[in-house]
Structures are given as C-alpha cells and as structure tokens.
Amino acid sequence: MFKKKITEPIRTEQMNERLIQASLWHIDDVMEMLGALPEGISEQEAELRLEQHGSNEIAQDRRSAWYVQLLGCFKNPFILILLGLCLFSLITKDFDAAIIISTMVTISVAISFTQEYRSQKTAESLKNLVKTTTSVIRQSPAREIAVEQIVPGDLVHLSAGDLVPADIRLIASKDLFISESALTGEALPVEKEDIQLTTDPKLKQQRKQSRKLNPLELSNICYMGTNVISGSATGIVIATGGETCFGAMARTLSGARPMTSFDRGVNKVSFLLIRFMLIMVPIIFFITGFTKGDWMDALLFGMSVAVGLTPEMLPVIVTSNLVKGASTMARNKVVVKQLNSIQNFGAMDILCTDKTGTLTQDKIVLKRHLDIHGHDNDEVLKHAYLNSYYQTGLKNLLDIAVLEHAELQKGLNAEHAYQKIDEIPFDFHRRRMSVVLKQQSGQHLLICKGAMEEIISISSHALDDGKTVLLTDDMRVRIQAIVRNLNTDGYRVVAVAIKEPRQHSEQYSVQDEQDLVLIGYICFLDPAKSSAAPAIEALRSSGVAVKVLTGDNEAVTRKVCNDIGLSTDSILLGQDIDDLSDEKLAELAERTTIFAKLNPLQKSRIVLALQSKGHTVGFMGDGINDAASLRQADVGISVDTAVDIAKESADIILLEKDLMVLEDGVIEGRKTFGNIIKYIKMTASSNFGNVFSVLGASAFLPFLPMLPLQLLIQNLFYSISQLSIPWDNVDDEFLAKPRKWDASSIGRFMIFIGPISSIFDYITFFVMFYVFQANTPASQSLFQSGWFVVGLLSQTLIVHMIRTHKIPFIQSRASRPVLLLTGAVMLAGIYLPFSPFGNSLGLQALPLVYFGWLAAILLGYCLLTQIIKGWYIRRFGEWL
C-alpha cells in the first residue's frame, strides 16, 4: 500500500486509510512496509524512489504561454461573429468593411490580453521564490536537502520554524507543537507525539462510541504544508507530493474552473442577441433581394445590418470597464488576477469567509486573568507570568501572549527577585508544566499551569479571597461551571496553581505536582479585528450577507462572531453536513450564518449549495483548506501571505488583510456592471429599433435606405461615442444592492424601448420622402444623408437617456468624458455629409431647413423616451 507508484494518483479514501493505518501500526511495521532503516535509506535508494514516486512537489495549473492567452481572448462569441463577417468582407472584396471590423476586433483583443497578462505576471511575482530545504538522515548525519528531493521512507528531522515537507509518522518527539491552520483552519497549534494510537485512551473511547477516526486529527502524524511552532521531532515520510493530504486537495483544483455568474450572464445575453441577429438578418436579406432584385447588394446590405446588430464594442466596453475597475483596485493594494471577478464583486450577495486571520488578528491574546470565582485577579497573572518567564526552550503561543504583559517585568523584578531551581517540562499526557523558583525569603515556590481538568485533579486547596481553603467537591463543580461558560464564550482556559514545598530539593519531579493550591485561571482568545465589525456592517448595508466557514471549533467561532455583530442563533457543524442531501443543505445554508468544524470539501459544498439557490457567492480564505472553495466561488479572494495553492485558486489577491477593501470592491464591481449594462441596453434597444426601420424602408423604398458602407461608418461613429462609458458616473441608487445579469430583463427592455427610435425613423423617412422629395434613386443620396444624421444623433442621444433612470442633464449628468465624446461624435456626424469624405461615402450636404426638422425630431424622441421610461420603471420596477 505504501509503495504504490505516483503515476496512478490514489483516491482520497485510500489516502485517508493509509494515514490511519500508519498511525495505528507499530512504528517497526511502518518502517518495514516503507523499506526504511533506522539509519536512513541510502542515496542510491533515494534516487530510485525519486524516479518511482516523482518529485515532492504539488501539481498546480501552470500559467499558459502568452500566445495561448492571446488566442483565448478570441473566444468571445461576438469576436467570432465579427471575424466571420470580416472574412466574408475579404471574400467579397469589401475591404473598407473588413478594415472597420478588424479594427474593432484588434482594439478589444489587445486591451483584454494586455491587462490579463499583466495581472497574472503580478500575481506570480507574489509567490515565495526562496527554495525550501529540510533536514534528512540518509546513512549519515542529518543534512539539509531540497524539499523536492524527499521520498517515502526518508527519516526527517523537524525543529521550530520548519515547514513539514511531507506526510510524516513520528518516531520521536519532544514538546512538538504544529500549526495546522493552513490545512484545517484551527487557530491554535496542535501537540503531536510519537505514541502508538492503539494505546491511546482517546482512541479506545472513540471505538466504543463507533466513531471513525478523522485522518486530519491523528496525533502522531504531521501533515505536509503545516509548520512547527515549537519543539523537535524525528519522523518517517509516509507520502510525498500529490499523495499527501495537501497534494490531494491541490489535485482536485487542477483543470478548468467552474463558470462564474459573470460567465453565465454574459453567455445568456450574448446568445439572446445572437439569436435575434440570426432571425432578423435573413429576413432583411430576403426582403431587400425580392424588392430590389439585386441579390449581391442585398447580401452586402444584410452583412452590414449584421455588423450593425452585433454589439461589436461589447468586448471592448466590458474589458475597458473591468480594466478600469482593476486599476482602481490596484491603487487600493489589490491584485486582480481575473478581470471578470470585478463584476462578480458587484453581483455578489453572499460573502463566505474563513475566520482565522480574516475576521481575527491571527494572534493569541491573553484577555482575562481570574480567581476561582471568575473575578479579575492580578495575582493569577503574576504567577502565570513567572511560569512563562522561567520556562526554558522556545515559548509556545500561549506563553508569548502572557509575556506580552511586559509591565509585570519591572513590577515583579523577576530576574533578581527569583532564582530558578528546576523545571518540570510539559508533556502530552499531563498537559501541564511547572517551574520551581527560590524566593528572596529562601522559600521555594512551585508554579504549575495547564489544562483545567488536569490542574484541578492535583489540587487539594484553593485560594479564596487571599485565604487558602480546602477544595471541596461543591467548589470543584462551581469552578468547572465557570470554566464551561468561559469555553462557551470562546476562551481557551489555562489553570494556575502554586505550592510551597516543605522539603527543598535541587531536583523536582512529577511526583511533586500534588496537593497544589488552585489560585485561578488565565483566558486566551484569537480576538476579532477592529475593522471586522464595521466592514461587515458596510457589506450588510450594501446587500451582501456575510457567512463564516471555518475549521475552528464552535465555541471560539461563536465568540468571534458575537464580537463582530454576526448572528449566532444557529451554527451548523461539519459533522452534521455529511448527512444532509444537497437540497436540504442548500435550504439550511441560506438560513445559517456560521459553519464550524468544516473540512475543505464541506466548505466547497456549502458554496456550491448557495450557488444552486441563485446566489452569487464570494469566498475569502488563505489556506490549503480554502483552495477548493476559492475555486468554486464566483469570486475567490485571498491574500499575498496565503499558501501558493490558495493564491493560484483565487481571482483577487489582497496585499493587506482588510475587509474594508471588499466593500470598495463591491462598489467598484457594481459601477462596472452598471456601465456594462448601460452599453448592452443602449445597443440592444437601438439595434432592435433599427431593424424595424430597415425592414419598413427596405419594403417600400425604391432604393436602399442606407448604403452598406454608410451603415458601417454610422455604426463605427456610434461605437466610438460609447467608448467613454467605462468612465461614466453611476447613480447611488443603482449601487445600493447587488446586481446580476438578467437576459430576460434585457430582452424586455429591447422590445419596449427599441421601437421608440423606429417611430422617429419613420417620421424621418416621411420628411425626407415627401418634404424634401428624396423619393427616387437619383435623390437617394439626400435621403440617406438625412437618415444617417438622424440615426447617428438619436443613437448617440440614447446614451444619455438610458444611462440613468432620472431625467438626463437635469437630475443626473454624465461624466465629462461621456459628454465630450458624445458631443464630438454628434458634431462629426452633422459635419460628415458636408465633407469630402462624406461625399466619397455617397452622402451630400443637407439644406439648412433640414436642421429645424432634425431638432424637432430629436426633441420629440427625447420626450417620448422619458415618458416611456417613467412608465417602464413603474411597471417593472427597474431600469438598468
């Protein structure tokens, strides 16, 4: 089982079973199965195993070559349609059309490729480029080798500060504490010991209760990706690379990531517009062909209408909006890896976040020091400080938290007022440690601190209001009730007891830890960040619900969530999730705010369940246990200090762990979506109106209502006027709640608003045909010039009419770039028929009286649009 080649990746169940068996077996049996030796394997054997099992590396998706990324930018359906139309133009030798279309494609692809390539390069530079080494014994004294060279059967030495290089069964250990927060989400370090689990009383109890061992909670196994906080150990490598717990999680993340709400929304809208185009263009082609009799002209005209109906600037507008959002986020120390994630921010209505280091300071802090009645007591802190101060070796996180009370150093004069006599080190079974000090009076003082149940079991007396009293059974019950309440509030409680031995000695032992006087307890927390509560409130006010998904325990999670203002009425635990169907989990997930004791797959399953209910879900985390959820979420958010696989899986990387940045991202995402949807609704409604205009004109006019090249130039001018939309203002009311793609809303908008322009197009046809007598093939140039100007100006004005639900120019004014560019395009459109270039297009100068009609038509168009807008908002409760 242990010698399985890595060319066939084992399943998670097999990996779990292997870890459990390695944990339960005697170490001699494990070494025999792995072909390991007490003095370590030889270098020759290591080379053979390296060839057999592969390098000790975690497989990650490699960044594609630049040319692959470039080709990927052409996958947009509108880009493919335009490329098809460009190819057709070349075949039919319509080079002007080919140049115009290819220009649109080039601009869009260049912007998209440049930004995404730059973002991925930036994200890559955040990785730690320093090569990691580990201490290995190979029939010689321990020496450092690259982690990638580790193989199953190697003997590895671990010490404080080391990363665990593989999944390891311990052979020997001393005061070994491992931080597993990157793997499990547990904030506090876990003690590991070289015991055989079959002799562990906890295991026997679990078997009595028919509970299956958790492969991530084995006390004699150290896992790849975790790190040593204190102590030292020697262990034998069970698995490397992709066969480790870390590697198995990473392996599930390779390949194409799930479609996000942005992808699904764009696809729905794209195919709605494509279906519309595929239906209408053939109709126009056949009507024009039958009425005019020239099928080649009809084909060219139909192709020009297809270009006009294609929102060819959609890729440019979308990408420009996303690039602008990414640039804004970059100024706030945020690296946007996937441009689409900016819009997903705006659509996000649920943010799932890990707790440790995100909502909390990721730092153990001593919060309370209490007597046996639960009242603040400085004597307890004083003795705890002396215990930690005189403890030898590296301090664990709890000792460091105690020693941060540096003000005691001066008051106690610990260095001179006390002399250390001896120390009784911490061990896993006792779960306590003691120091013995000589006081200035000459009397010895034993100070013991440790787990409450251990300390109270060796205490015969207690300090009650300064007096030493017998520790009765009633007192024990009351003390345990106080501790349970503290645990419920999320505190980790450490008891403190003292003793003044009657017989002095130079050496003390565990037997001296008897008949102690319990003086109280010290309470630790991983406190919430000061910015967490206001950030969550800001997100809530923006319509984003925050849910906590953590691997930490229920009590600690409840305390932190209470502190930051999240409801703790219902908490769903990981052990309860596995028994739920997907449908039941989805229902509970919507109603539940806090999920604790989760494994990585359960986190990802919760994200998927929320998405199945139509939510756009963001996930924020930084450990390997978060990577699957980061990948599954619509927008994955990590930090630059996260493990590499988490950064690989994320769409956005924060250079600072600040939740307030997320609120800024939400607003920026909604601005981005607002400006994108403006363009889509402007283009969709305008194009829909133009189809009706072209259909009618093609049916009754004895000539084409506009030449193909004129249509392309008009469409180009109109598209240029919309290039400034990414820099437009967005109304505050629009930013107040999450925004999602809704193809049905766009279709409805197109049907109700589009025909308004057709009304005024037909008025223009009537005016040009009867007032200006442009009703014969000889006078078609005048007719086409008149409609060219009206069509261009009305399409440009619609930018201002549609961009806001308010009255344009009065209640809501466009940004300066939009005003300047739309104004410039309108002036250029009026001037074009008078210019030599216009003449080359078949346009001609318009009479002065025409402009009176033009003003009346445009004014009527604006007034009717505003009236219909008011009705539409009242009827459907939305605009953009």
Image: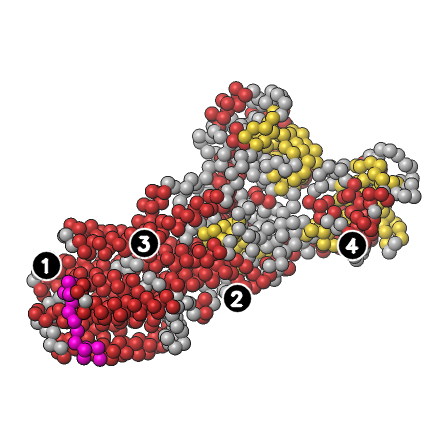
- How far apart marks 2 and 3 lie (CA) works out to 36 Å
Work out whether residue 572 or residue 654 is closer to the camera in this orientation and state it.
654
Identify the mark nearer the N-term, 4 or 3: 3
- How far apart marks 4 and 3 lie (CA) works out to 66 Å
Tell me how the rendering is colored.
secondary structure
Indicate the position of residue 315 as horizontal and vertical percent values.
Answer: 33, 56
Residue displayed at 57% across by 21% down: 41
Identify the mark nearer the N-term, 4 or 1: 1
For disc 1, the marked residue is 295
Q: Which mark is residue 108?
A: 3
Q: Which residues are magenta?
A: 839-852
Identify the mark nearer the N-term, 1 or 3: 3
Indicate the position of residue 852 as horizontal and vertical percent values.
Answer: 22, 80
Amino acid at pointer 3: Ser
- How far apart marks 4 and 2 lie (CA) works out to 39 Å
Say if 626 sits above or below 420 in the image.
below
Say if 645 sits above or below 1 in the image.
below
For disc 4, the marked residue is 370
